[in-house]
Image (tube, rainbow, N blue to C red):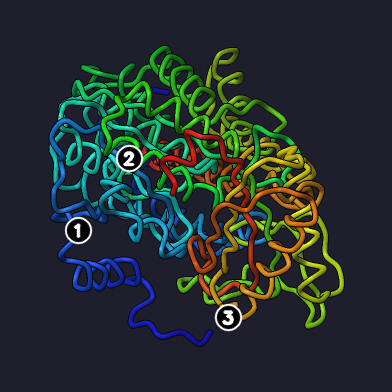
């Protein structure tokens, strides 16, 4: 293992200290916690927005704390869901009496820990709702689909909407509507290494790629010889468009997301092809995002996320 | 088989020892079908459990088990934290105010724990989870005059039965057929807890001879 770390046991703590040092104008760390909250929290009159998950997916989720985005992000150990007491601290810190919406990626650990935190909050009289994002088309069963990069669209759209005054019930509906119209698909070229174990999560041959790998290295749909960028872009995009049933004439936003160690150059090459293919299909690409939004430590590869836009979603996104 | 506050404390101490001794093995079981941290996460939790209960003087089992549960919930994370936390918390409710766990209370506590596990994890038998250990153990104590060694054997059989099952729940389920040729790490750690229960009451029985 070759990493720039001190004691591997302290990576999350030291990372949070670093984020706080850099972004103290926007956010602060709650004492004795792994929770980063907006400086203004709780914002009076606004629904609170909380997300979180295991660490190792930076900038998710702490990087999305701020105006028109999250009020708080809770960081767990690397690739391990945060605990309910931590999530509960975040809920308490952002509730202004208008309730709190939890945006959860569909992983059993995350779902259970956020569930328990919601129960704790309800017991203290804080109204709490949860929306679970399941955008990974690599898993056939819809109920079992993982929450991946599409979650960021939910943060952004709902974040803007609650800033503009949506109440909790409306925010839940909008979050479900967004989650229902977003799908992702990834490809990985190289595994990530969890600092505490020091071992790669899986192995791939030098000339192999895996389609549909999860953000913790869970197996995807198939392994095959590495192809050129245009082929990869086409395969990922086609799968997502097909699953989302996007047709000619519709509007979409697309995120080409790097998984940790893939250069921006390669992401732009992929996105170039995505834009060309959409144009050929007469699907309108209204908004593009290219970069690292939901990473998997140093995993190499990318994911493509498509959000089908309607007037509502577009008005909050753009 | 009656358990006093001291017995339950010893059970938790032995559980911690077993988890620590098997930390690497539990994480190895988790490596091919998860992310290889089950032993590490549970080890961190049980170390804190032992520290917590050593500091306190308990008059009854409920408060002790509640501290065990809350510590696991706040220190373990992942799926194991809420699952074990819920199981112990539900049992703690049943044992509230009781200075001793009688066999009847043991049944009630385990029934509540299994119910909690099912609700929280939404898993059933045969899906390669810790349920495959807890449910046969519950069946056994509901239907028999409990012999600690038999209880341990039932837990062991349950644990072993997960080898060959295809995972249907949790991150392991994404491995589909590839998950089959392994013991479920959660089933193994659950077996360790029941083995610890057997050993902690056995030590006591020995001491009385």
Is A7 left or right of B54, judged from the image as shown?
Answer: right
Q: Position of residue B206 (x, y in %)?
A: 41, 40
Q: Between disc 1 and disc 2, whose residue precedes?
A: 1
The mark nearer the N terminus, 1 or 3, is 1
Q: Secondary structure at mark 1?
A: strand
The answer to which quarter of the image holds residue B128 is top right
Do marks 3 and 2 both belong to one polypeptide chain? yes
> Residue at point 75% right, 64% down?
A233
Indicate the position of residue B37 as horizontal and vertical percent values: 51, 59
For label 2, count other residues whose C-alpha is less than 10 Å away and answer few (under 14), some (14-19) or many (20+): many
Q: In this rendering, is residue B114 above or below A142?
A: above
- Find residue A66 and report its horizontal and vertical position in percent: 26, 53
Q: Which residue is mark 2?
A: A84
- What is the chain letter for disc 2? A
Per the rendering, the mark at residue A27 is 1
Label annotation for residue B209: none
State the residue position of label 3.
A263
């Amino acid at each position: 293992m070759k990493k720039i770390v001190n004691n591997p046991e302290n990576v999350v703590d030291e990372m949070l200290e670093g984020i706080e040092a850099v972004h103290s104008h926007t956010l602060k760390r709650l004492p004795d916690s792994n929770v980063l909250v907006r400086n203004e929290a709780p914002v009076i009159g606004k629904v609170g927005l909380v997300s979180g998950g295991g660490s190792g997916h930076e900038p998710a989720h702490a990087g999305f704390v701020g105006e028109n985005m999250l009020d708080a992000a809770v960081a767990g150990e690397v690739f391990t869901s945060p605990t309910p007491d931590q999530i509960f601290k975040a809920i308490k810190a952002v509730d202004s009496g208008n309730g709190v919406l939890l945006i959860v990626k569909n992983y059993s650990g995350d779902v259970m820990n956020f569930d328990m935190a919601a129960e704790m909050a309800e017991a203290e009289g804080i109204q709490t709702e949860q929306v679970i994002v399941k955008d990974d088309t690599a898993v056939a069963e819809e109920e079992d689909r993982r929450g991946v990069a599409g979650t960021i669209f939910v943060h952004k759209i709902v974040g803007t909407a609650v800033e503009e005054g949506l109440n909790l019930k409306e925010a839940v509906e909008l979050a479900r509507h967004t989650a229902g119209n977003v799908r992702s698909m990834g490809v990985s070229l190289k595994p990530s290494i969890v600092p505490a174990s020091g071992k790669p999560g899986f192995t791939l041959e030098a000339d192999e790629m895996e389609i549909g790998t999860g953000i913790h290295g869970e197996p995807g749909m198939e392994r095959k010889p590495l192809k050129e960028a245009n082929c990869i872009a086409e395969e990922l995009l086609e799968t997502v468009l097909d699953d989302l049933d996007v047709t000619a004439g519709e509007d979409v936003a697309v995120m080409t997301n790097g998984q940790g160690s893939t250069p921006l150059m390669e992401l732009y090459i992929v996105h170039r092809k995505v834009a060309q293919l959409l144009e050929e299909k007469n699907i309108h690409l209204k908004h593009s995002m290219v970069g690292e939004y939901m990473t998997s430590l140093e995993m190499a590869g990318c994911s493509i996320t498509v959000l089908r836009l309607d007037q509502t979603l577009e008005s909050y996104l753009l | 088989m009656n358990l006093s506050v001291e017995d339950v404390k010893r059970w938790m101490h032995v559980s911690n020892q077993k988890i620590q001794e098997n930390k690497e093995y539990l994480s190895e079981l988790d490596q091919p079908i998860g992310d290889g941290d089950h032993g590490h996460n549970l080890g961190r939790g049980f170390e804190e459990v032992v520290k917590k209960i050593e500091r306190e003087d308990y008059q009854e089992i409920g408060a002790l088990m509640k501290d065990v549960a809350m510590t696991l919930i706040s220190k373990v994370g992942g799926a194991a934290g809420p699952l074990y936390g819920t199981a112990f918390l539900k049992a703690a409710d049943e044992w509230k105010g009781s200075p001793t766990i009688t066999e009847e209370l043991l049944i009630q506590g385990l029934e509540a724990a299994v119910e909690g596990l099912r609700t929280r994890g939404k898993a059933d038998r045969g899906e390669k989870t810790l349920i495959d250990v807890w449910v046969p153990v519950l069946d056994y104590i509901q239907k028999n005059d409990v012999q600690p060694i038999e209880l341990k054997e039932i837990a062991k059989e349950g644990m072993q039965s997960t080898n060959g099952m295809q995972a249907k729940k949790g991150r392991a389920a994404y491995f589909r057929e590839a998950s089959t040729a392994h013991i479920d790490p959660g089933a193994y750690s659950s077996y360790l807890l029941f083995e610890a229960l057997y050993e902690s009451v056995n030590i006591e029985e020995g001491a009385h001879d």
